[in-house]
Amino acid sequence: MLRLRLIAAGIALGGVLADQATKTLALTQLDPTRPVPLLGGLLTLQLIRNPGAAFSMGENFTVLLSLVAVTAAVAVVGWMVPRVRHTGWAVATGCLLAGIVGNLIDRLFREPGPFRGHVIDFLQLPHFAIFNVADMFITAAAVIVLWLTLVTQVAVDGTSVKESQKAPAESGVDE
């Protein structure tokens, strides 16, 4: 169990560091008025400051988004991490926490101020929203969770999804 918590913590810490380092580079190296196409236009570096959520939705709800992120981070650390009993779930949990905390740091410490800070986004694929490394970690967590629950059918506690969905009376466990 300690090994799984260390996996989650290591991924979360590494993800937050990678996210913040790339955002710092983007802020110091990119001009918001001059996109930088790479790989024949497959990837464009385009610096924006996003007050909203994915696809810049909810731009007028930055404080609420910040509070949701704080709640999500507390829930992952306080509820999910202690229940992880499978390596895949440890990886997913670490990725999710990296993404939440990476963007939360922006909301807490960037302009225009605490809980109103704009998230730094700078990666763009053709016909897609501009995003950052934290967003990539959140997406990776979602993919891993889908894989674990739908394909391998492993619950967060390491049991079969089918077993974890049974009612206590059905599973033979007394209440």
Image (spheres, grey):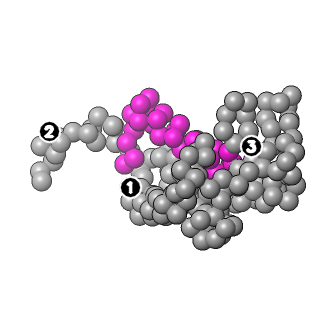
- Observer-nearest of 44 and 50: 50
Q: CA distance from mark 1 to mark 2?
A: 22 Å
Crowding near pointer 2: few (<14 within 10 Å), some, many (20+)?
few
Secondary structure under tag 3 reads strand
Q: Position of residue 24 (x, y in %)?
A: 78, 60
Residue type at mark 3: give it: Leu
Location of residue 108 with respect to 68 vertically, above or below = below
Q: CA distance from mark 3 to mark 1?
A: 34 Å
- Tell me, for residue 170, which label it has, or none: 2
Q: CA distance from mark 3 to mark 2?
A: 49 Å
Left or right: 150 in relation to 104: left
Depth check, mark 3 against mark 1: the one in front is: 3
Over which residues does the magenta segment extend?
Answer: 131-157
Q: Position of residue 141 (x, y in %)?
A: 54, 44
Crowding near pointer 3: few (<14 within 10 Å), some, many (20+)?
many
Q: Position of residue 14 (x, y in %)?
A: 67, 57
Ranked by sequence position, the earlier of labels 3 and 2 is 3
Residue wearing tag 1: 83
Pointers 3 and 1 in contact (C-beta within 8 Å): no
